Image (cartoon, rainbow, N blue to C red):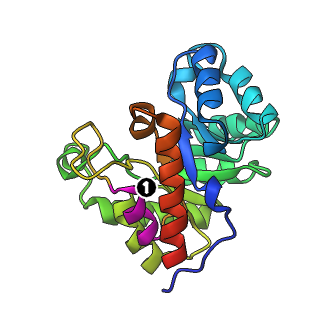
Amino acid sequence: MTYVEKNIASHDRLIFALDVATRAEALDWIDRLGEAVTFYKIGMELLTSGDYFAVLGDLAERGKKIFVDLKFFDVPATVASAVRGLTRYPVYFCTIHGNDGMMRAAAQVKGDIRLLAVTALTSLDQHDLDDLGFRCNAEQLVLSRAKAALAAGCDGVVSSGLEVPALRREVDHALITVCPGIRPIGNSDDQKRTLDVAQAFAAGADYIVVGRPIRQAEDPRAAALAMQKTIADTLACA
């Protein structure tokens, strides 16, 4: 298949992982990054602060897009109830695990939220998948879950950029691909299946999620702006 480009603003394709423990830290990062980042992911670390929905409101007030990354996993009725509750808030993306029953139930109540199915975490390699009892490689697992997600009514998947070329070859291009695990070449942290920014978009990613490479940069705002330029340049050459 030839990839069919989606109508996504270039500056929205970079999602910053707001992995902090308090609202004060979150606000500091939002202010520090300014116009360099328009899309934020808020996950489980912030949830335990008690300020999760306050930060969600702060992001909305500043005109930012919001990705709720809580990876819901429970019986289908409970997952559906959680997703239905999120429709009260200005949420753009929400994650659930790629189980058929959960995905179908959540898709029926998602409203305007774009529902993303988690395929295989980027911290997992083949050894991890073997230990978990999967009788396939990461690409096969991602493809299987992506096809099931689209059939169940989800809008997209979260996967490593390494699997995106296969997704583009074998799955309807309506599928949104959101890729974490974006790292410089020579990365040595806990993310195992990684690509850099240009590689991810050259492979056909729609969005990337970046945390530590921005947070740990000497100048985080400059790092984010450099990534935005790389995204724009890569897309222009596609």
Q: Where is residue 175, by image quadrant?
A: bottom right
Task: Report whether residue 72 is seen.
Answer: no
Q: Nearer the viewer, residue 186 or 42?
A: 186
The reply to whether residue 47 is visible in this rendering is yes
In screen coordinates, is 210 left or right of 104? left
Q: Which residue is mark 1?
A: 159
On whether residue 228 falls in the magenta region, the answer is no
Q: Position of residue 101 (x, y in %)?
A: 57, 51
Vertical order, 168 against 162 (above or below): below
Q: Residue at x 42, y 65 (%)?
A: 144
> Is residue 99 found left or right of 133 in the rendered image?
right
Q: Amino acid at mark 1?
A: Ser
Residue 203: within the magenta? yes
**What's drawn in magenta, residue-wise?**
195-204
Residue at 74%, 36% (x, y): give it: 86
Categorize mark 1 by other alpha carbons within 10 Å: few (<14), some (14-19), many (20+).
many
